[in-house]
Image (spheres, rainbow, N blue to C red):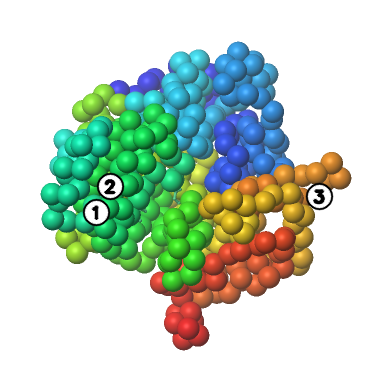
């Protein structure tokens, strides 16, 4: 199924890389990609105020929806590889378009992105391939939803079928709440994304994130990670995009990971092939480790944020070659991810009010940072006309540190965070609590 390599524009060159996206995830990808000396320049469309602090990186202003302008710019900059970060351009078919123009693109086409942009399609996909996941019902009317909710003997989770910026999942405590969530979705709270509702059996267990880099037929796994989705300490409060993460996740032993490969990852790739979907990009498996074994909570067609910021510093300079091989359908499957033998942890600093309403435009001060094995990746920042760094999002920046154990990692991360300030800064102090021995002694 792989496309012959020489079909690609600049198939034997890897000097100019383009990353599409504006978050901490994209900055961390840029940081890992520029490590390779073969790479001369990394462009980001649009990037954010932190992007140009990264060596070799430059922001570009182009509207990615203006296809002619985009193509002109890519040719002018002699782009050799394009990495698409967020799900929306992938769901809109940007990877298909650029691939048709013979660019090497890391990111699935619209057909593959459906794993993320339609939860009901993903559930049916898993059903077809016998992949373990929670039982589900797909409905498009309130009567149907009501019937299922009030006759169900098990607690249910309610989800909008389509993309909803991470806000389309409800975990109700009662049948009434469950019904109200279905009503909210079907009444248009998420627009067309709520044309269908997925009602799912509520399952239990710790969550882990597994990332497979795929070339259409073969895959390699990145180090595993666990993120912290809840806003408040002790994993309480509303769901967020992610407040911090650590990698690898010791919960997944080698044996358990082998089980996940056999029961979930290989069947997913086989089913994509069966459905003639040539998936060249990352598949993010959001898994729950239940007492009955691993189950898929969700697929995403992109890297996780903040898992990506956490994992990228563990990559060596070969990383960009892995992305290129995926884009060309050239993985052998025997590549080894040459990750360092360190572990990594990330804490996100947010604006007070996130994930709801928050203010932006506050100056950010950064004091004396221990920069050895420590990175700051901006998520939502901008520069004012005097070049001062300002807050410009709910998640503002991430501090990522590496060391030989998680206690040292988080000691360093929090020490550095004390050097960073802006009005209304909020972060969780218990990121990585599952893996910090000192945390339990102190708390
Ligand atoms: P999703 O956007 O599908 O990943 O869902 C967001 C979060 O909701 C997940 O990370 C889980 O914590 C929770 N969740 C989703 N589906 C279920 C389920 N079937 N049972 C229990 N919790 C769930
Ligand atoms: N960290 C969760 C996500 O990226 O969806």
Q: Are marks 2 and 3 in contact (CB under 8 Å)?
A: no
Q: Residue at x 39, y 33 (%)?
A: 188
Residue 293 place in picture, x, y as percent: 20, 59
Of labels 1 and 3, the one closer to you: 1
- Badge 2 element: helix
Residue 357 place in picture, x, y as percent: 59, 50
Q: Nearer the viewer, residue 71 or 359?
A: 359
Q: Are marks 1 and 2 in contact (CB under 8 Å)?
A: yes
Q: Earlier in the sequence, mark 2 or mark 3?
A: 2
* Residue bearing mark 2: 179
* Residue bearing mark 1: 175
At label 2, counting other C-alpha atoms closer than 10 Å, the crowd grade (few under 14, some 14-19, many 20 or more) is: some
Residue 254 place in picture, x, y as percent: 29, 61
Residue 345 place in picture, x, y as percent: 52, 63
Q: What's the CA distance linking mark 1 and mark 3? A: 50 Å
Q: Residue at x 37, y 53 (%)?
A: 209
Question: Can residue 113 be seen from the camera position used here?
Answer: no
* Residue bearing mark 3: 388
Which residue appears farthest toward the top when viewing the image?
68
Q: Is mark 2 within 8 Å of ligand 1?
A: no
Q: What's the CA distance linking mark 1 and mark 2? A: 6 Å
Q: Earlier in the sequence, mark 1 or mark 3?
A: 1
């Amino acid at each position: 199924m792989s496309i012959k390599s020489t079909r690609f524009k600049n198939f034997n060159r890897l000097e100019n890389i383009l990353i599409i996206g504006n978050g901490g995830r994209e900055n961390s990808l840029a940081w890992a990609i520029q490590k390779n000396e073969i790479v001369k320049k990394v462009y980001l469309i649009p990037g954010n105020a932190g992007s140009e602090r990264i060596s070799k990186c430059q922001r570009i202003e182009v509207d990615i929806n203006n296809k002619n302008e985009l193509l002109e710019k890519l040719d002018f900059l002699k782009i050799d590889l394009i990495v698409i970060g967020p799900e929306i351009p992938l769901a809109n078919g940007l990877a298909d378009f650029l691939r048709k123009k013979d660019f090497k693109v890391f990111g699935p086409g619209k057909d593959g992105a459906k794993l993320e942009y339609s939860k009901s399609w993903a559930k049916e996909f898993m059903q077809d391939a016998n992949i373990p996941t929670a039982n589900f019902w797909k409905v498009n009317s309130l009567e149907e939803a009501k019937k299922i909710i009030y006759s169900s003997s098990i607690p249910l989770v309610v989800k909008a079928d389509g993309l909803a910026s991470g806000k389309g999942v409800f975990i109700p405590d009662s049948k009434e709440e469950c019904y109200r969530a279905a009503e909210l979705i079907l009444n248009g709270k998420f627009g067309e994304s709520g044309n269908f509702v997925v009602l799912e059996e509520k399952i239990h267990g710790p969550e882990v994130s597994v990332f497979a880099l795929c070339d259409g037929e073969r895959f390699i796994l990145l180090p595993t990670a666990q993120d912290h989705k809840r806003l408040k300490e002790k994993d309480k409060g509303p769901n967020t995009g992610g407040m911090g993460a650590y990698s690898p996740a010791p919960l997944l032993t080698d044996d358990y990971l082998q089980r996940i490969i056999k029961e979930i990852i290989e069947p997913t790739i086989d089913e994509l092939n069966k459905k003639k979907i040539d998936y060249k990009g990352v598949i993010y498996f959001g898994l729950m480790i239940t007492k009955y074994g691993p189950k898929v909570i969700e697929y995403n067609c992109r890297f996780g944020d903040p898992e990506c910021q956490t994992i990228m510093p563990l990559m060596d300079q070969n990383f960009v070659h892995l992305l290129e091989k995926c884009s060309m359908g050239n993985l052998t499957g025997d590549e080894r991810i040459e990750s360092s033998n360190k572990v990594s942890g990330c804490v996100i600093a947010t604006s007070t009010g996130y994930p709801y309403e928050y203010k932006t435009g506050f100056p950010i001060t950064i004091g004396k940072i221990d920069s050895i094995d420590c990175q700051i990746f901006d998520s939502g920042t901008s520069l004012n006309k005097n070049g001062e760094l300002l807050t410009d999002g709910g998640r503002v920046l991430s501090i990522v540190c590496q060391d030989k154990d998680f206690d040292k990692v988080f000691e360093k991360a929090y020490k550095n965070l004390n050097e960073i300030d802006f009005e209304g800064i909020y972060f969780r102090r218990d990121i990585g609590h599952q893996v910090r021995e000192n945390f339990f002694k102190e708390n």
